[in-house]
Image: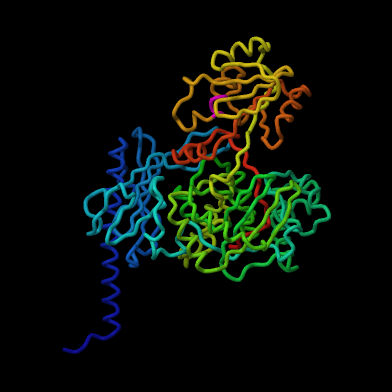
Amino acid sequence: MPAMPAPELFTLLAMAILVWFWFSGLKAREMAVASARSACERNGLQFLDETVTLRSLRTTRNEHGHLVWKRLYAFEFSRTGVDRLQATVLLQGSCPVSVDLRRSVDVPSDNVVPFVVPSLRAGGGCVSGPCGGGSCREEARLRLECEASEIAPSLLSAGPYLSPALFPARESQMTLVRPFPALRPATGRAPEVVAPPYDVLNTEEARALAAGRPYSFLHISKPEIDLPADTDPYAPAVYAKGAENLQAMIAAGVLVQDEAPCYYAYRLIMGSHVQTGIVAAASVADYDTNRIRKHEFTRPDKEDDRVRQIEALNAQTGPVLLAYPNAPEIDALLNSATQIAPDADAIAETGVRHSLWVIRDAPSVTRLTALFDALPALYIADGHHRSASASRICASRKAANPQHDGHEAYNYFLSVIFPDHQMQILDYNRVIKDLNGLSEADLLQRIAANFTVEDADGPVKPTQPREFGLYLGGRWRRLHIHPSLVPSDPVERLDVSLLQKYLIAPILGITDPRRDKRIDFVGGIRGLAELEKRVDSGEMALAFALHPTHMEHLMAVADANQVMPPKSTWFEPKLADGLASHQL
């Protein structure tokens, strides 16, 4: 029998592969439907099975080093039979790794929109029998293992951390963080370049600070300072000017890019406070699936501004401030990297010292990547609009790129990640314009219904949660909320929530602190003297000093997929712009 011609053999082989892929997709979709239905049933929700669609498809490696398909399916469910809410199912091979049920969060109507956050997490165990012919280990190990798939620690709930040795074959491009070749100040140029974050200065303050400093990064982050004074800071010419200034600083040799991907140890020193973290590129995919966890709403106008800025520069220049949970080996590796002279060193106008060390050696880079990839989550401390804009840019560029493979720079965003136990949150205090028609005596009487009220000899800086300082009529008083009023909910039990619910809203009549002009907020960096000054001047009638929110409180809110009240955290020290940028 004559041999089959090569073209026909190739055609038959291609058809066989397509048929196999088609059947594999059908099987995976059936597993996704079964997983979604089971998760909805367990949570008393209505599963809308006709809405299951494939959102993304890419390859990854399982723990045996075998290539498998990683599929993300989107579907909808309903709580009432009328509403339609979004959710996702993640499969690796044909094994369901996680079902992420999502709901929209109600927000004020003043053009503020929420990110969509997971509200119910259905994890553990295979949903409907054996997973692709393999078997699943007990949930206590916080892993799902299947012959045809790998574990995705990104979608497991917080718990005992997984050793990176469990995932030897994961591709670095698909990890939680990865190294990148930063664009950074040339040797000795950092003091000329570094600048405060773009959003802590107005235009006039930025113009004054950059005066006589042609290479200040403010010329890139606040480029309207180089245009006429009446220029709209959101005009197209502003973003174009920023791009022009960036290219000019590169051409002048002030900013240079590392030849190979690196990590960077970053140390901040403010007085006696020291924190050491890492500059890395963080995964947009893990942001989208809430492994990089959020705790704030975002506003479309602020997102739009960051999107236009990043697109114009083709670079991310404002880092997102993240926190990582307890990981002593990461701490030790970063500390080891700082035992030599820094590659960049600068003292900002605020007196904060910013130091950067390049981590180039392959063993350290590989180990850091694996250690971070073993963490269950990272937490956004500051930079929700920057991370949201990175997600938008990734989606738009992915859609426009027929050769997209997930390895492109736009799949990651610039971040600085510190250990949670080193981060410093200062108090975020409140000042109120009037007493809502009450006399001082009436106000204190009403406050006493929910708080103990004690006279104080001097300024009251609360030293523990549930304690508040009240400055009224030239005198300080110490308040303690009645313990019976403190709930277990991670948001409602925050001091800012308790003060709002039991005093500011019912007694002072301020029900919407986001928009009410009778209330203002004073960062703890200004001290209690600023509160006294604003009340004694007659500008405000009273002030409240609060105990700082703790990092564990913020992380608990993010883990519960909830949102912090407005003006809950004031992080210090602030990051510097210009020390490292991520080019796309």
- Looking at this rendering, what residue extends furthest in the bottom direction? 2
Q: Is residue 503 above or below residue 258?
A: above
Residue at 62% in and 16% down: 454
Q: Is residue 14 above or below residue 452?
A: below
Residue at 57% in and 62% down: 263
Residue at 45% in and 65% down: 405
- Residue 497 among those drawn in magenta: yes
Residue 119 percent coordinates (x, y): 41, 39
As drawn, is 260 to the left or to the right of 35? right
Q: Nearer the viewer, residue 148 or 483?
A: 483
* Dominant SS in magenta: helix
Q: Nearer the viewer, residue 39 or 570?
A: 570
Residue 331 percent coordinates (x, y): 53, 54
Task: Please provide the residue range marked out in magenta.
Answer: 495-499
As drawn, is 321 to the left or to the right of 162? right
Q: Nearer the viewer, residue 301 or 64?
A: 64
**Residue 509 appears in which quarter of the rendering?**
top right
- Residue 274 among those drawn in magenta: no
Q: Nearer the viewer, residue 78 or 146?
A: 146
The answer to whether residue 388 is visible is: no
The answer to whether residue 11 is visible is: yes
Residue 311 percent coordinates (x, y): 61, 57
